[in-house]
Amino acid sequence: MKYTPKVIRIAVSAMFFMAGLVFSSWASRIATIQQKLHLSDAALGAVLFALPIGLIISLPISGWAVTKIGSRKVVAAALALYGIALVSLGLATNVYALAGCLVVFGLASNAVNISVNTQGVATEAMYPKPILASFHGLWSLAGFLGAGIGTLMIGQDILPAPHFTAIAIITIIAIVICWKYLHNDHSHEDSTPAFVMPDKSLITLGLIAFCSMVVEGAMFDWSVVYFKKIVHAHGAWEGAGYTAGMGFMAAGRFVADWFSHKFGLKRTLQLSGALSATGLLIVVIFPYLYPAIIGFMFVGAGISSVVPMVYSAAGKSTTMKAGAAIAAVSTISFMGFLIGPPIIGFLSEAFTLQMSFLFLVAMAICVVVFSTKAKV
């Protein structure tokens, strides 16, 4: 049975939303888990390297699965695993258990990322105007909600395990409801290779997204810690920067399609990098509550449009099928999302957490540089 574009769009939107909710639930409780396991910044940075290990393991599996069995089956299975892995993070009682759970969490997150964006591009093709950024806007909106829920849980002294279990149950219910409305893109006759090296234009797009996602990943994993240790925020205010960043990221993504259509992709990406760099400099130079909140607002607005714009452009590649192109670009960009947080942990130990954020300023500037050179 064929469903209308609107129905399919709602189902795909729900998958983006749940993916954002799962990740932001973890990000909002990192400081709690760090305190629970008595981890230093360097130890936390080291254990966060388990996420990119999961990504590396996931690459051949996700690439093969999306190509051979279709993104619908992959997104359903991977999102369910994502929720289950989230619960395991809340139950971890030592650093080794946490690292093992993070490997699985990273594996699932990459599979979800590739498959849900493949679903998004297929849905965008059903509409006369770009809509992919709005899907990412829902991911960010879920992140904003997840941050708010996490802040509430922290304020009420609720442990991560019951918090994460509730999120996992909601996620699985959403998968069951939306399953039949997702794109069934499995083809028995599809002979596309499971993994294809991207061409030069796709590599450039991947590098732009990589630099932006280094900033994004670090903001998610370290903003709460930064507000606690550098800004000296207390209680629920510890999550204020994260919440501000997620809120402006969500808002930015809901206008990104319009802005890009009016001013062009290159200018959109250049402005994005400039906003991120400005916001990060504010956070470093003025480490006080209100300036830091404003700084993270700039960062959220800056990183809002980069990934959806890059994925949308990759999906229109003339040298690869949409799914393969997205998988290739996603592989490059998502690595930045996962290696950014541990790098900040090591830089924090070597210098200070405040100074480590200058590395993120450099990454934001690289977004401007690569976007200027890109042929988009």
Image (cartoon, grey):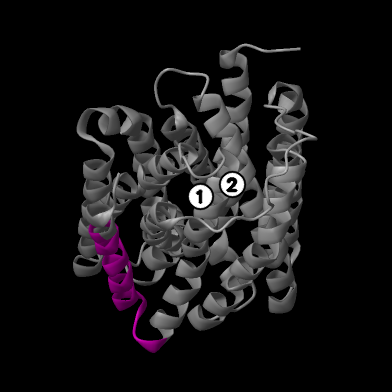
Disc nearer the start of the sequence (2/1): 1
Q: Residue at x 50, y 74 (%)?
A: 342
The local secondary structure at tag 2 comes to helix
Q: Is there any visible trace of residue 162 in the rendered image?
A: no
Where does residue 21 sit, x and y in percent of width and height?
Answer: 58, 42
Locate residue 220 relative to residue 87 in the image: left or right: left
Residue hosting label 2: 324
Locate residue 364 relative to residue 15 in the image: left or right: left
Residue extending furthest toward the right: 188
Q: Quadrant of residue 328?
A: bottom right
Magenta highlight: main SS: helix
Where does residue 120 sit, x and y in percent of width and height?
Answer: 55, 32
Screen quadrant of the C terminus: top left
Q: What's drawn in magenta, residue-wise?
A: 350-369
| Amino acid type of the residue tagged 2 in the rendering | Ala
| Amino acid type of the residue tagged 1 in the rendering | Thr
Q: Which mark is residue 151?
A: 1
Q: Residue at x 67, y 49 (%)?
A: 163
Q: Quadrant of residue 56?
A: bottom right
Where does residue 135 sit, x and y in percent of width and height?
Answer: 49, 32
State how many labels appear.
2
- The correct choice, above or below, for 165 with respect to 358 in the image is above
Q: Residue at x 47, y 18 (%)?
A: 127
